[in-house]
Amino acid sequence: MNRLPHSDALGAGMQRREFIALIGGAVAWPITAHAQSPERTPHVGVLVGLASSADDPVAVESLRPFRDEMRRAGWIEGNNIRLDYRFGGGDLAKITASADELVAVSPDLIYAQGLPAARAVHQKTQTIPIVFAQVADPVGFGLVKSVMHPGGNVTGFVVWDLSIGGKWLQLLREIAPDVSRVGIIYNPDTAPYAPPLIESAKAAAGSNVTFIEFHTRNDSEIEAAASLLGREPHGGIFVIPEPFTVTHRDQIISQSARFKLPTILSVASAVDRGALIAYTYNYDAMLRLPVSYIDRILKGESPSNLPVQGPTKFELSINLKTAHELGLTVAPSLLAIADKVIE
């Protein structure tokens, strides 16, 4: 249940970009190009950017809702649909190579999880329909011409509007009111959308909060950032959600605990692993949504006419044990609106 006030799932910022792109018009897409004949089994390529293999826990977690929803929609793997999986392991070179492999086998559609995967596939084909998930700012990064009218071979589902950075900062300071030095952790190589998130956080913070950006590309740099923040009181960590920080979340959580730094992440499962607080889309629901578009495109609809959509449900998670270890008392008002509380 999303009990926190939040702007429209696509947000004002994205609406402005959508309006500008809409003026330019949409590119027509041949609706019948990939319609299936009754005797032919549809072939769908699946590229999971963060997972290294089918056995990777990230793959297991992210593909379960997708597979469940495909079955619910009547698509049975090995029966009336062929699913061809590739994995990127969070490595841009491997993601690119996997995109090459999928495009080479000419599937009827490609489902791409994550911005790097979606961009890699889009760079390889402008004809095979692509449905993306877990992407931020698809207009800004050239995946679609506009939100309402994508205008090409790509459409899908965004994780949140970039204005959500302000909400994350507000929640961090609500659970830890004394935080006045905020370290922003992310890898700029894998988070090109970080600047708008940071700006929205700064706008929500006011003048009494100092921000320090830490560009982290390995565990040692995460440790160094936490160590620096921990040298003085009132430090906290704001984690930009992106491939590097997601795959290194345990190190971020560990160093946050070591240096006693209140930290907000946008991965709900991070709270189960010891993080203080998380606010993000409902993971299971979000990864079921793309199946509706996959189903419609396989039945002959055009991706150019299917508007980009956002999540319909957000969740707030709090770890009270971690709060106690940090010497924090969580306000009853915050606990009352939390969807998940770990004691």
Image (cartoon, helix red, strand yellow):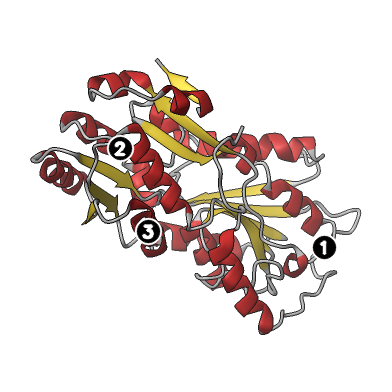
Name the residue furthest top.
343
Which badge, 3 or 1, comes first in the chain's sequence?
3
Which badge, 1 or 2, comes first in the chain's sequence?
2
Q: Amino acid at mark 2?
A: Thr
Q: Quadrant of the C terminus?
A: top left
Q: Residues within 10 Å of mark 2 (few under 14, many from 20)?
A: many
- Circle 3 or circle 1, nearest the eye: 3
Residue ID at (73%, 65%): 303
Q: Nearer the viewer, residue 334 or 148?
A: 334
List x then y, in percent, for residue 48.
52, 49
- Circle 2 or circle 3, nearest the eye: 3
Can residue 131 be seen at all in this image of the molecule? no
Residue beneath label 3, please? 203
Name the residue furthest front.
207
List x then y, in percent, for residue 247.
36, 43
Query: Helix, strand or loop at disc 1?
Result: loop
119 displayed left or right of 257: right
Residue beneath label 1, please? 301
- The total number of labels drawn is 3
Query: Helix, strand or loop at disc 3?
Result: helix
Q: Which mark is residue 195?
A: none
Q: Amino acid at mark 3?
A: Ala
